[in-house]
Structures are given as structure tokens and as C-alpha cells.
């Protein structure tokens, strides 16, 4: 542990396949990190600003981070902007070690851009004014219900969800959870079927990620899942035709 400076983690891992940890995971590892003076860096680029039903995903997952990194939803993607939130002791360490150079020894390539910062302030104002967190919390049960229904499909090994982020993992054999051969690109093919039915969902290997706009309405959310189910039926016919299932 003396060679480890920090652990970097997303509350809910996004691009890795929408992996939702057990609720006791982060509370369990925190004492170990503290014992060995290891920082916990919280990547909130996807989770932050309401996606999981709280301002930060760490609040939802019981994570107590040392620092928080955020972007994307900080401006609702209307302009590039990122930020790092650090505690006083880390800031002071930067200040103390910058004294010899005579200037603060840290910066961002696009740090303090006035347009990005203005949009960031406005986005936060809108999140609060329109109660986006409340909207996510209200829609989360519908989101969960539809993903649970998808989980019953023969091609789906399991579904995972937290707030308004979720994933459906494709399998060749539902009983054993045997995956498809990655070379067959089943997830990518399903994404094409989804596009054919007028929706856009991202495939992460053979996991289909659901990350709808947080302003989505309940009818729109149900329509998204209705279209996905049509695409899933097409995918089932395709994998049988290709001889990819047991």
C-alpha cells in the first residue's frame, strides 16, 4: 500500500458497462484507504448533477471521496467545462509547494473560460429551478420497472440501474450467463436495430447503456423502452439466424 497514492473510481462505472456496486462497497473500503493514507478520487463526469438522484453519485452510493472531478453535465454539454473539487489540505499543499516558483503550480488548459463558466452557473440555476433531481427520483421507479421487464428476455443476462443510468447485458445462454463471442459484435448489431426503430442507445461491448436526458418525460421514457423491445426482438431473430445461441 505504500506505493499507492490514490484510488480513482466512479460511483457507478459508466463506460465499463454500467456497473453498480453494492451499497456497502464504498463504506467498506474507505477505512482501508484511510489506514494507508490513500486518497479516493471520485470521477463524477457521468454520475454528477442528478444522474443518480442526488447532486453527486457519491451521495447515492455512500462514497466519501477526497476529491471530486466533474464535467459534461456541469454545463449540460452546451460548452466544454470541467472542474475538480479539492479539500483545504490538498489546496494548501499545492500552495506551499508553489511558493518556490512564485506562482500557483497547477492549471487547466481551458481553465476559467468565461463562456463555459457562465453556462455552468446557468445550468446549475436551471437544475435547481426545474427540480431536475426531483424529476430523476420520480422517474427512477419507471426506469427500474422497464429494465426489470427487459431482464426477462432470453437474450438478457441481467440489467443494472441507479437513478436514470442503466445497462442491459446480452448473453448467449441465459441459464449459464455465457457471453456471446465478442468478435460477433452482437451489442453493436442490437444498437443498429435500435437506430432502425428511431432511438439511439450506446453499446458497451455486449452491454447496452441507458442514459436518457434528465428532462425526459414518463411517456417519452416508456416510448424509448418500447422501441428498444422492438429492436431486441429483431436481435433475437438475428442471433438465431446466425446460430449464435445455444
Image (cartoon, rainbow, N blue to C red):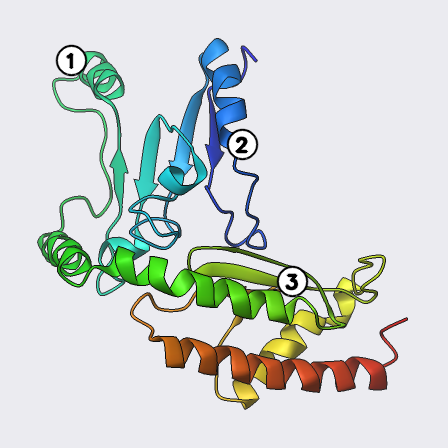
**Which residue is more in the foreground, 13 or 143?**
143
Indicate which disc residue 170 carries: none
Decide: few, some or many residues near mark 3? Use Cα within 10 Å; few <14, some 14-19, many ≥20: some
For mark 3, give the secondary structure. loop
Q: What x and y, as percent, mark residue 87?
A: 25, 23
Residue at x-position 41% and y-position 68%: 212
**Which residue is more in the foreground, 75 or 136?**
136
In the rendered structure, are the residues bearing label 2 and label 1 in contact, judged by CB atoms less than 8 Å apart? no
Q: What x and y, as percent, mark residue 221?
A: 42, 75
Can you see residue 216? yes
- Quarter of the rendering occupied by the C terminus: bottom right
Q: How far apart in space, not on screen, are marks 1 and 3 (Cα)?
A: 48 Å
Indicate which disc residue 99 carries: 1
**Which residue is more in the foreground, 147 or 67?**
147
For mark 1, give the secondary structure. loop
Q: How far apart in space, not on screen, are marks 2 and 1 (Cα)?
A: 41 Å
For mark 2, give the secondary structure. loop
Residue matched to label 3:
205
Residue at x-position 40% and y-position 31%: 41
Residue at x-position 29% and y-position 63%: 135
Q: What x and y, as percent, mark residue 67?
A: 33, 30
Q: How far apart in space, not on screen, are marks 3 and 2 (Cα)?
A: 27 Å
Residue at x-position 15% and y-position 61%: 126
> Along the polypeptide, which appears first: circle 1 or circle 3?
1
Indicate which disc residue 24 carries: 2
**Which residue is more in the foreground, 58 or 89?**
58
In the rendered structure, are the residues bearing label 1 and label 3 in contact, judged by CB atoms less than 8 Å apart? no
**Compared with residue 171, is residue 98 higher up or lower down, i.e. above or below?**
above
Decide: few, some or many residues near mark 1? Use Cα within 10 Å; few <14, some 14-19, many ≥20: few
Q: Is residue 101 left or right of residue 134?
A: left
Amino acid at each position: 500500500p505504500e506505493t499507492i497514492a490514490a484510488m480513482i473510481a466512479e460511483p457507478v462505472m459508466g463506460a465499463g458497462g454500467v456497473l453498480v456496486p453494492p451499497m456497502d462497497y464504498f463504506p467498506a473500503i474507505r477505512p482501508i484507504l484511510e489506514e494507508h493514507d490513500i486518497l479516493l478520487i471520485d470521477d463524477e463526469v457521468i454520475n454528477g448533477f442528478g444522474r443518480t438522484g442526488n447532486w453527486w453519485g457519491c451521495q447515492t452510493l455512500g462514497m466519501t471521496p477526497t476529491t471530486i472531478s466533474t464535467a459534461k453535465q456541469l454545463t449540460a454539454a452546451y460548452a466544454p467545462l470541467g472542474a475538480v473539487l479539492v479539500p483545504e489540505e490538498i489546496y494548501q499543499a499545492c500552495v506551499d509547494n508553489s511558493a518556490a516558483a512564485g506562482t500557483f503550480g497547477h492549471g487547466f488548459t481551458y481553465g476559467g473560460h468565461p463562456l463555459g463558466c457562465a453556462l455552468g452557473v446557468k445550468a446549475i440555476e436551471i437544475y435547481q429551478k426545474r427540480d431536475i433531481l426531483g424529476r430523476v427520483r420520480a422517474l427512477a421507479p419507471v426506469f427500474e420497472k422497464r429494465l426489470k421487464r427487459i431482464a426477462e428476455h432470453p437474450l438478457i443476462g441481467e440489467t443494472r440501474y441507479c437513478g436514470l443510468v442503466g445497462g442491459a447485458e446480452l448473453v448467449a445462454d441465459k441459464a449459464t450467463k455465457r457471453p456471446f463471442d465478442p468478435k460477433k459484435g452482437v451489442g453493436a448489431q442490437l444498437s443498429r436495430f435500435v437506430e432502425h426503430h428511431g432511438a439511439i442507445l450506446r453499446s458497451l461491448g455486449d452491454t447496452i447503456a441507458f442514459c436518457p436526458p434528465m428532462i425526459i418525460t414518463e411517456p417519452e421514457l416508456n416510448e424509448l423502452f418500447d422501441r428498444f423491445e422492438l429492436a431486441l426482438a429483431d436481435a433475437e431473430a438475428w442471433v438465431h439466424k446466425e446460430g449464435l445461441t445455444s
